[in-house]
């Protein structure tokens, strides 16, 4: 069975930087078995209904602004896998729509550029349905778990703590007390495979409310939890809070 990975992707600049986080992405990548395809669930693609990219050659999407030109020149010309949607539909109970308009956004390629390297493995993205609850997303992740036995590497890309309104640019290597506390508590829930807490964010403590002001960067973590198996060993890497209110904490289950 292929592993499932959750990556705290942080800033798009990680795509073109070599730092301890990106070095760890590359190191983790070297330990992964060669997948037939990659299914990426990124914080940066929200839709009404669940969609899956089905184009032969997905475009590289630069879904950000205000960064250096060098970042906008990055291209990740990986192939797609139009047939993977049929395998996904075979395993899931809800509706899955084909999408030919999206591509590979920076939540995916900024990580895969380091973790996979050369863009030779087919990559498909699955969107976040805005109408679903966290528990709905977890259940879909549980259904997608079967893809791991089909040679599909599931990569979930978001952030455990993601509050851009409270970023502290003067603290590049540390976090506010509430952010560190929330990161530790959420990490505990992931390592304990505590579905109830992860899908309800109970207890609704102030650190959690500040850490997850909106759901889009948190939901990939819920998919990771759903896609794990009872026989998996779950471990964390890149466990750190930076810039006051942004967590790079990541997990792998295999």
Image: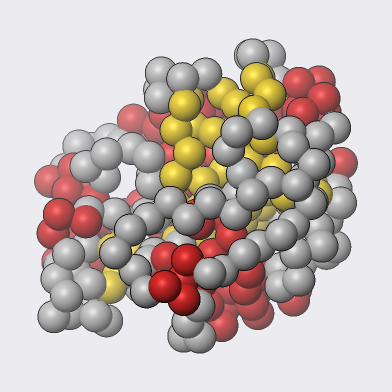
Residue at 75 percent across and 64 percent down: it is 119
Judge by depth and name the residue closer to the eye, 138 or 170.
Answer: 170
Where residue 190 appears, as percent x and y from the top left, is: 47, 50
Q: Nearer the viewer, residue 189 or 183?
A: 183
In this rendering, does residue 158 appear at all?
Answer: yes
Task: Determine the image quadrant of residue 89.
Answer: top right
Q: Residue 217: x percent and y percent?
A: 38, 46
Query: Residue 200 falls in which quadrant of the image?
Result: top left
Residue under the image location 44 percent in, 44 percent down: 44
Q: Is residue 174 left or right of residue 16?
A: left
- Which residue: 56% across, 23% down? 50
Residue 202, by quadrant, is top left
Horizontal side of residue 4 vs 137, given as left or right: right
Q: x%, y% of residue 47?
A: 47, 26
Q: How is the image coloured?
A: secondary structure
- Residue 227 against residue 105 in the figure, above or below: above
In the rendered image, residue 180, in percent from the top left (x then y), is placed at 24, 65
Query: In this orientation, does residue 188 appear?
Result: no
Q: Quadrant of the C terminus?
A: bottom right
Q: Nearer the viewer, residue 198 or 48?
A: 48
- Residue at 50% across, 85% down: 18
* Numbered marks: total: 0
Query: With 79 as the anchor, is 210 left or right in this view?
Result: left
């Amino acid at each position: 069975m292929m592993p499932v990975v959750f990556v705290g992707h942080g800033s798009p600049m990680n795509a073109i930087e070599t730092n301890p986080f990106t070095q760890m992405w590359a190191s983790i990548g070297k330990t992964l078995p060669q997948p037939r395809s990659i299914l990426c669930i990124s914080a940066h693609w929200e839709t009404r209904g669940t969609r899956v990219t089905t184009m032969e050659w997905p475009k590289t999407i630069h879904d950000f602004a205000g960064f250096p030109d060098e970042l906008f020149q990055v291209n990740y010309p990986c192939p797609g896998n139009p047939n993977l949607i049929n395998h996904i539909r075979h395993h899931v109970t809800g509706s899955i729509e084909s999408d030919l308009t999206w591509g590979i956004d920076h939540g995916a390629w900024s990580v895969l550029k380091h973790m996979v390297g050369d863009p030779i493995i087919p990559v498909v993205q699955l969107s976040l349905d805005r109408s679903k609850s966290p528990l709905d997303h977890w259940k879909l992740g549980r259904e997608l778990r079967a893809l791991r036995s089909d040679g599909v590497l599931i990569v979930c890309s978001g952030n455990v703590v993601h509050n851009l309104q409270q970023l502290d640019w003067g603290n590049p290597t540390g976090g506010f007390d509430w952010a560190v506390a929330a990161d530790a508590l959420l990490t505990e829930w992931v390592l304990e495979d505590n579905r109830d807490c992860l899908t309800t964010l109970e207890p609704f403590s102030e650190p959690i409310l500040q850490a997850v002001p909106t759901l889009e960067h948190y939901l990939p973590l819920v998919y990771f939890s759903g896609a794990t198996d009872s026989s998996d060993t779950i471990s964390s890497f890149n466990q750190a809070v930076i810039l006051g209110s942004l967590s790079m904490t990541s997990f792998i289950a295999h």
